[in-house]
Amino acid sequence: MKKSIIALFMVLTVFVSCKKDSDKKPDTASRNIRYEVTGNFTGSALIASYTTAGGGTDNDPITSLPWTKEITYGTNVAAAIIAISGNGGVAGQKVTLVIKRGGIQLGTPIEAVADAVGSFSKAAPAIVF
């Protein structure tokens, strides 16, 4: 009887400790990054400044929301960044930046809120390859 209880305990331990990891984790080998900007900002200037596929920088005017940019970075690029800025809006208007690597969202969305004069500037943490 004692051996049966020990065997049952061992089987239960295996089932409990072998839980399948269902959390989606970013594919850290992926060099494909997708930037998604949404929100209600209506200012006269909304700009995304980011690292290009070859490692340079570019500034894209965002003429309407939502806006997306997908980039596959070259192997010579060590890190990528993005910053969004806007002016001419109304205090309290917002934009939200979501960054996806290999189709999986990185961290939490980044929110920027226009200040009393209707402007904002927000940078995301660097993505290191």
Image: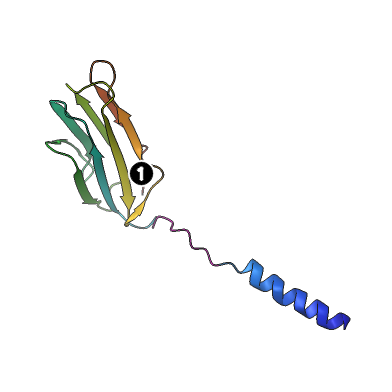
Q: Residue at x 19, y 23 (%)?
A: 89
Q: Is residue 13 visible?
A: yes
Q: Residue at x 22, y 50 (%)?
A: 71
**Predominant secondary structure, magenta span:** loop
The type of residue carrying mark 1 is: Ile
Decide if residue 69 is on the left or right side of residue 102. Answer: left
Q: Nearer the viewer, residue 26 or 54?
A: 26
**How many numbered marks, from 0 up?**
1
> Is the N terminus in the top left, top right, bottom left or bottom right quadrant?
bottom right
Specify whether residue 23 is painted magenta. Answer: yes
Q: Is residue 53 visible?
A: no
Rendering colour mode: rainbow
- Residue named by callout 1: 127
Label 1: state its secondary structure.
strand
Asked if 45 appears above or below 73 in the picture, the reply is: above
Residue 13 position within the rendered picture, expressed as x and y whole percent measured from the top left: 71, 70
Residue 77 position within the rendered picture, expressed as x and y whole percent measured from the top left: 28, 47
Asked if 90 appears above or below 23 in the picture, the reply is: above
Q: Residue at x 33, y 34 (%)?
A: 111
Q: Nearer the viewer, residue 54 or 85?
A: 85
Q: Residue at x 25, y 45 (%)?
A: 36
Decide if residue 11 is on the left or right side of residue 53. Answer: right
In which quarter of the view is residue 120 placed?
top left
Badge 1 crowding class, 10 Å Cα cut-off, few under 14, some 14 to 19, many 20 or more, is: some
Specify whether residue 41 is painted magenta. Answer: no
